Amino acid sequence: MITLLILSEQAPSRYWQELQQEKDEAKDAGAGEGNKEPTTEEAEESKTPKQKKRKFKEKQDQNQDKKCISGKSDPFPGKARIPEDRLQKFKRKEKIKKPPHQHYKLRTMIARSEEASEMAQKQAARFDLLLPEEAGFLEGDEGEDTCLVSQEDIANAVDITSGAKHFNLKLSQFGPYRIDYSKTGRHLVIGGRKGHVACIDWQSKHLMCEINVMESVNDVKWLHSESMYAVAQKKWLYVYDSNGIELHCIRKFNDVLRMQFLPYHFLLATASATSFLQYLDVSVGKEVVAINTKTGRLDVMCQNPQNAIIHLGHPNGTVTLWSPNQKEALVKMLCHQGAVRSVAVEKNGTYMVTSGMDKKLKVYDIRAFKPLKSYFLPAGASCLSLSQRGLLSAATGDIVQVYRDVWSTPVTKPYMAHRVRGTVWGLHFCPFEDVLGVGHQDGFTSMLVPGAGEPNFDALDANPFRSAKQRQEWEVKALLEKIQPELISLDPTELGHVDRATFEQKHEDRVKALGFDPLAKVKFIPKFKKKGRSSAGRVEKRKKQVAHEDQRDIIRKAMEDKRKTEEERKNKEQKKTLLSSQKSALDRFKK
């Protein structure tokens, strides 16, 4: 009996069948009514974007007010507050004054730009907590002087990886040596005075290439990546790849003594013995400009990383600032009583340090072009170099001294000191590493200087651990974002301002060339209307009406000017009559 009942029952319905039944019932119910009410989905679709946005915000607020899984409400609702000092650290620019309402497109563009800038500032301030590394300095015990701590003691005290960064290359046959680290700080190029040139991955101690150019070498410099470097030889400028193969011999650049590479402009700036400052665009291989400085031999040179201005030191004690856009020096500063021996500029472009034959080391504020500090060194400083964290290295003979906070507080003793095996010819701090490279008569020395390098690097700009594929991608992007040499100026913030005087002059020249004013009011053309309203007579009538309005404006303006001149004439006549009506003492003698 039970089995028969089970068989007579219908099979259990599925979920899609239930949904279909519900829809059919709703359709039947709706057909019976004259006006059916819209469903929730239809009501949502009929809403405007502003209403949808408002409802979305209300839902977000409701979700925030909801309690957590544990049953307790959040005691600190919303996003975490960012400290004001950290926000100021990542501030990019001041807010721009918005244009009038008629320039609505420009207003929206400025508003979007400011929103993106503010969001980037807040994100950078939040992610600053996640940066793992911190800069640490060498701290001695009570009464201990840190400059007496030797490199061997530091190498033994630190871990094996850091200790391996201190090493010596004995190359006494071809010295003294000029040196340069790549932008990522991974690769090193050294050039001996007697022709020896070598590229090294100095962290893994892998020799990339080693050649002898068979003539004297004045300077070496990495170009935009570690695949190319430039060598200033006795006669001309040469470019080699990382395998030691000669790529170019540039004969326009002769007798080059010093070089600087501007990475964001792809420009190689060279200073020669013939008093010429030349710029080479390495992306296209063409000379941009050649400037005759008329100041004699140029063997002291450095760049300002902030604005790409070249600083040159001269035998008469002056330091001049140059850009490729002007044939004359932007600034001339008298820094020393004797010849200038070396110049270095801080990475933020605020301070400049110079040393001269008068045995003085001077610190200048470039923003005001005024001296801040002056130190006397018994033997003078032949080479200067500034690290990313503001440490200053100065070489006097065969002794290298490192100073700390030279522009903020008076310095009485060096932070660190080290004696090398020959006269120092080149100094360079390694980017993102606590290492100072020293090129001298007897080869090369890598010094450990705690607190010198920036601990956190920007992987999109200079990544020490990038692969060959990443380097290729970065090179393409860097070429697309290349800054033109015309934009190099003493104050980079001026690029955002409009030169109104130049604009007016250009507009006048354009009017003269075209014979009419392109910005003048356009002649009225009536709009075409249908249903016989654009017949010839009606179109002419509309034209006359607009012309009459323009004519009325002209007549109104002319009448206003006439009224003003009439009033001025009447005022003058009244003054005259007043003066004539007044009796004077001489009137009695009139006949």
Image (cartoon, rainbow, N blue to C red):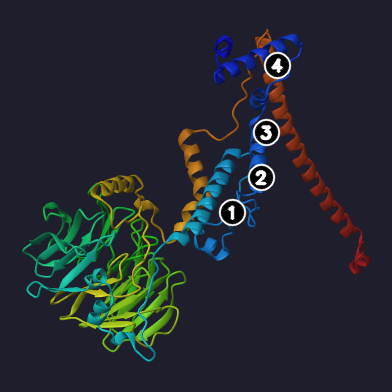
Residue that appears at 36% across and 66% down: 454
In depth, the one of 377 and 535 nearer the eye is 377
Above or below residue 550? Residue 355 is: below
For this orientation, the residue located farthest to the bottom is 143
Labels 4 and 3: the sequence-earlier one: 3
Q: Amino acid at mark 1?
A: Lys
In depth, the one of 87 and 252 nearer the eye is 87
Label 3, residues with CA under 10 Å away: few <14, some 14-19, many ≥20: few
Labels 2 and 4: the sequence-earlier one: 2
Label 2, residues with CA under 10 Å away: few <14, some 14-19, many ≥20: few
- Whether residue 49 appears in this view of the structure is yes
Q: Which residue is mark 3?
A: 51
Residue 423 falls left or right of residue 13: left
- Whether residue 296 appears in this view of the structure is no
**Mark 2 vs mark 3: in front:** 2
* Rendering coords of residue 23 (x, y %): 63, 16
* Rendering coords of residue 12 (x, y %): 56, 17
Q: Amino acid at mark 2?
A: Asp
In depth, the one of 99 and 172 nearer the eye is 172
**Residue 541, numbered circle:** 4
**Residue 61, numbered circle:** 2
Residue 63 falls left or right of residue 563: left
Residue that appears at 26% across and 70% down: 162
* Rendering coords of residue 130 (x, y %): 45, 60
Q: CA distance from mark 2 to mark 4?
A: 60 Å
Q: Amino acid at mark 4?
A: Lys
**Residue 79, numbered circle:** 1
SS for dot 4: helix
